[in-house]
Amino acid sequence: MLVLNATYEPINVCTVRRAVVLLLKEKAELLDQAAWRLHSEHATHPRPTVIRLTAYVKVPRDTHRRKITRRAVFARDSWTCQYCGSRSNLTVDHVIPRSKGGSAEWDNIVACCAPCNRRKGDHLPAQANMHPRTTPRAPSPHIFIHVATPTIPPAWRQWLPEAA
C-alpha cells in the first residue's frame, strides 16, 4: 500500500496489515481502495491501496547518504543499461573504475548490462569510448517507492511524480 504524508507526498510502501492498523488507529485516512474488501469475524473493511497520514512526518532528504543498492541504481536508471539501452542481464558499473580512483557514490555508479560491463572492463569512459546516456546522480526520494515495489499499481500513478 502506498503511504502519503499529510501533504500528499509519497513517503513509503507498507503492507495491507500495517495500512489497516494505521486506519483503525485513525493515524491515516483512506484515499483509494481495492474492489474487494477485508473480512474479519466481526467487521468488514475496505482493502486500502493508498492511505494518507493525518499528521505530517518529517522525512530525511539526504538521499546521497542512503545506502546504494543494485535495485536503487536500476530503478534510478529506469532498469536500462546506460551504455546500450538494453533492459536485460543488468549489473552495476563504476563509470570511473575504483582501480582508477573512482568512488562508490551515486554519481559514479550506473546500471549496465553484463556485455557492456565486460566490454568496458577496467577502462575510463574515454578509453573504452563508452559514455553513460545520462549523468549519474543521487536519485529523488521517490525512487525508493519504485525500489520497494517493482510494479506500480495504476491507483498509485496519480500520487507519484512522472520523473520517478
Image (cartoon, rainbow, N blue to C red):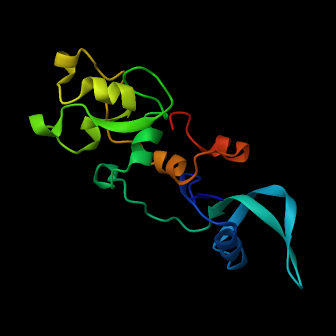
Farthest residue to the bottom: give it: 42
Pick the residue in front: 117 or 154: 117
Residue drawn at point x = 35 percent, y = 25 percent: 116
Q: Is residue 77 above or below residue 24?
A: above
Farthest residue to the top: give it: 129
Pick the residue in front: 123 or 49: 123
Asked if one can make out residue 101 in the rendered structure from this viewpoint, the answer is no
Q: Is residue 98 left or right of residue 41?
A: left
The part of the image, by quadrant, that contains residue 47 is bottom right
Residue drawn at point x = 53 percent, y = 46 percent: 146
| Coordinates of residue 33 in the picture (x, y in percent) | 79, 57
Q: Is residue 102 left or right of residue 135?
A: left
The part of the image, by quadrant, that contains residue 106 is top left
Give the number of marks.
Answer: 0
Q: Is residue 14 left or right of residue 47?
A: left
Q: Is residue 73 above or below residue 5?
A: above
Pick the residue in front: 64 or 86: 86
Asked if one can make out residue 53 in the rendered structure from this viewpoint, the answer is yes
| Coordinates of residue 26 in the picture (x, y in percent) | 68, 75
Residue drawn at point x = 31 percent, y = 32 percent: 136
| Coordinates of residue 57 in the picture (x, y in percent) | 48, 65
Q: Is residue 10 above or below residue 93?
A: below
Q: Quadrant of the N terminus?
A: bottom right
